[in-house]
Amino acid sequence: MQQDDLKKDFDALLPGQSTEAGASRRTALRVALGAGFGVGYAAAAMPVMAQTAIQTPADGLEAGKVEIEVDGFKVPAYRAAPAGRHNLPVVLVIQEIFGVHEYIADTCRRLARAGYLAIAPELYARQGDPSKYTEIAKLQSELVSKVPDAQVMADLDATVQWAGRHGGNLKKVAITGFCWGGRIVWLYAAQGPVKAGVAWYGRLVGQSGALTPRHPVDVASSLKAPVLGLYGGQDSGIPLDTIAKMQNALRDGSAAAKASEFVVYREAPHAFHADYRPSYRKDAAEDGWKRMLAWFKTHGVA
């Protein structure tokens, strides 16, 4: 994860809010995440736009914290599913840089109301607690930069298996993710047991390193599942020429690569789906959500 990836998310936060205004928004939007994860939004995600943040109720759902054991380590996760139902299609929900906070939990509940078992593992859990960070430099240097892609892929494999033991149909698994998680969607679609992916403004190119040896453009030609990319035309951190580069790589790839598509919302910025932030664009977010659900259905995850 590069410094500019993090800066994109923090730049989208509402500037210039007074302490009093920020406190009122925090008070209005501190919603319990069930039996774990504390309450509300990650500290670094403050202040919150109370007037646009969506709050999806958990009534009729099994929703809350679970733990997924991976090589002796218990990875916390937020799970939501229609109560009393089994053999459900599964969606892995991959966090933005702030971790599994209220926005990601609410996204799981929205998917559960659409008939899915949605689960969001806390993919930084071994490195630390992202909800405690308020400074971008510390979040990057002390936590995000230390998360290996290989660890993330293994945790997602374990999450899929957990879902299969708890009401999920492993023949119908999809993945979606936002920003940091959007990049992960592309990577997992190249190796994981999923039938479809939807990447919301995930970075496509980057510098390779020991912990992040490959990026989406490097795995594009070998995708095992088709991915729908939802991107903003005004996203300064993801230039349109990198989308064009990715599209070229997909054209020369596997059947799943060739079936992948991009939708670019020309007037939308980065994080246009994040309804609790000023970057939110209602029309693009709602259209992208409808496209996501249709993509899952088209590719057998419904």
Image (cartoon, rainbow, N blue to C red):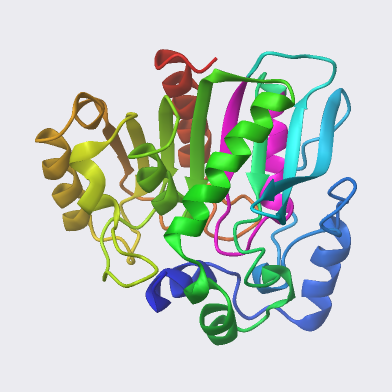
Q: Establish if 265 lies above or below 292.
A: below
Where residue 283 appears, as percent x and y from the top left, is 49, 38
| Residue 253 at least partly seen | yes
Picture residue at 34% right of the left edge, 34% below the top:
227
Q: Is residue 281 left or right of residue 40?
A: left
Label tally: 0
The residue segment tinted magenta is 89-112
Q: Establish if 111 lies above or below 8.
A: above
- Quadrant where the image shows the N terminus: bottom left
- Quadrant where the image shows the C terminus: top right
Q: Nearer the viewer, residue 191 or 15?
A: 191
Picture residue at 58% right of the left edge, 85% below the top:
138
Where residue 263 appears, as percent x and y from the top left, is 31, 37
Q: Nearer the viewer, residue 11 or 110?
A: 110
Where residue 204 appears, as percent x and y from the top left, is 29, 55
Q: Nearer the viewer, residue 257 or 136?
A: 257
Q: Is residue 15 rendered magenta in the image?
A: no
Q: Is residue 49 left or right of residue 239?
A: right
Q: Is residue 208 left or right of residue 34?
A: left
Q: Is residue 99 rendered magenta in the image?
A: yes
Where residue 48 appears, as percent x and y from the top left, is 71, 63
Q: Is residue 38 left or right of residue 253?
A: right
- The quarter holding residue 56 reads top right
Q: Establish if 116 lies above or below 273.
A: above
Q: Establish if 140 lies above or below 161.
A: below
- The quarter holding residue 222 reads top left
Q: Residue furthest front?
A: 71
| Residue 271 at least partly seen | no
Picture residue at 47% right of the left edge, 31% below the top:
287
